[in-house]
Amino acid sequence: MNTEIFAPFDLKIGYLTPKNPIALAPMAGITDSKFAAQFTDHVGMVVLGGYNLDELTNEAAQREVQRGRREFITDSPMEFLESELQAITGEDTGTAVMVNVRAADIEAYADAARLAKKYHAGIEINAHCRQPEIMELGAGESLLGHLDTLREIIETVRSTGAVVSVKTRANVVDDLEVAKVIEQAGAHIIHIDAMGGRGADVNVIRKIRNNTSLFIIGNNSIVDFSSAKSMFSRGADMVSVARAVINEPNTLRSLVDQVTSEQMLTGWYNSPKHICGGGDLRALTFCCLPVKPCAVHNALKQIGMTAKEFTRLKLDFVEGTPLEYGDSTCFGSMAWCCKISKPCFLRDGVMEVVGVSDVEFMQIKKRMSEEILSHRKN
Ligand SMILES: Cc1cc2nc3c(=O)[nH]c(=O)nc-3n(C[C@H](O)[C@H](O)[C@H](O)COP(=O)(O)O)c2cc1C
Ligand code: SF4
Ligand code: SF4
């Protein structure tokens, strides 16, 4: 697919501009530059690594290998990292590159970040690995239990000017507290393995969407567009895939094709489910006139807005847009109309008369959702 003439997404994370919201997730010992290069003609982002940045993490990885795990091991971590960055960024494919890293020493993170930036890549702090050898060094998932250290690492890495992501695992500690530390310390991205009891816990994505402005990469058990959509519709900006790529290497291509056609058909690839269907607060844009007892009232309470203020805001917003029409719809204006994927002959009839397309309808709804949330008081 030629991205120069076909670029339906408008994603920007610092100096990174992924061409679409599908990413390859890191798998130590597997996702090096050579492996990732198989996907750069189609995916929006590749996350390489996890690379071990110092002697201690390389020794720890060596011990893991002795018990059968795969790892990237090297005597010269920074030279190895640079050669990997050189190899993957040699050709401009429009795919954003991140390097997932672990270290026992804070300066190693900063050195790696400077290298990543030099190659127009971003750095991902691994706060996810739960191998005991890595955790004993205070790296990987152990950072989730030491948020002051995590904060210090993020701030140090951020001061290099690099784009910063933090890879976390859900349901280990308080996910919201972690996300807030990540945001306050200046990281751009939270890449969250939404590991739940059985498969992915998508509620954790919604919680983070509702309470931070971080770019969210949702991860865990994504095998097809339906599993990807369940994260997009809770507020993920991007989704990443690890194991399914090994089982079926075409998974990423198929996800790119499907999310691209969703974007072309609706104009809002990660639009939320309705609030009453489990969607995040962006879904207030699809809510009815708040006249009956339902979940909208709790959502309004969360953003500190009264029903009256909400009503005024939506009506003011649609004024002068095609959505102000809709006498024959449930509440007299398409300001209150449901998401385009919900079949409704009343709304579709008005849309036809006023000449508004599905994409235009959804784009206005998207802007309205941004407007509503820009007025939140909580
Ligand atoms: C073999 C293997 C190695 C992994 N290594 C890393 C790693 O180095 N860094 C990291 O952040 N996550 C690592 N992960 C976790 C994945 O990136 C991902 O979060 C996890 O597998 C859940 O996503 P999935 O359901 O798409 O596989 C690894 C996963 C696997 C299966
Ligand atoms: S206002 Fe309508 S869409 Fe919103 S939560 Fe209530 S019933 Fe659902
Ligand atoms: S007219 Fe249709 S789309 Fe609009 S609020 Fe009623 S059911 Fe929803």
Image (cartoon, helix red, strand yellow):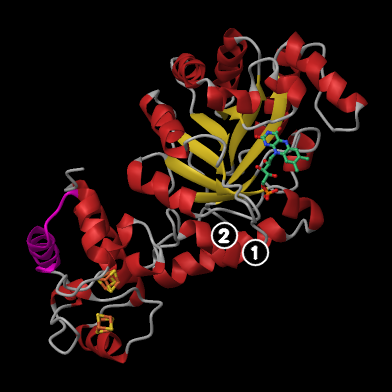
The dominant secondary structure in magenta is helix
Q: Residues within 10 Å of mark 1 (few under 14, many from 20)?
A: some
Q: Quadrant of the C terminus?
A: top left
Q: Is residue 261 above or below residue 78?
A: below
Residues at marks 2 and 1, CA–CA distance in whole angstroms? 6 Å
Q: Quadrant of ligand 2?
A: bottom left
Q: Is mark 1 within 8 Å of ligand 1?
A: no
Q: What secondary structure is found at the residue carrying circle 2? A: helix
Q: Is residue 50 magenta?
A: no
Q: Is residue 129 above or below residue 263?
A: above
* Labelled disc at residue 269: none
Q: Residues within 10 Å of mark 2 (few under 14, many from 20)?
A: many
Q: Is residue 317 magenta?
A: yes
Residue on which disc 2 sits = 228
Q: What is the x, y in percent for residue 25?
A: 66, 43
Q: Do labels 2 and 1 touch, CB within 8 Å?
A: yes
Q: Is residue 332 above or below residue 226?
A: below
Under mark 1, the amino acid is: Asp
The answer to whether 145 appears left or right of 86 in the picture is left
Q: Quadrant of residue 288?
A: bottom left
Q: Who's the residue at 60% across and 36% down the image? A: 97
Near-viewer residue (240 or 133) = 133
Look at the image and give the residue range highlighted in magenta. Answer: 304-320
Q: What is the x, y in percent for residue 39?
A: 70, 49
Under mark 2, the amino acid is: Ala
Q: Who's the residue at 68% across and 60% down the image? A: 223
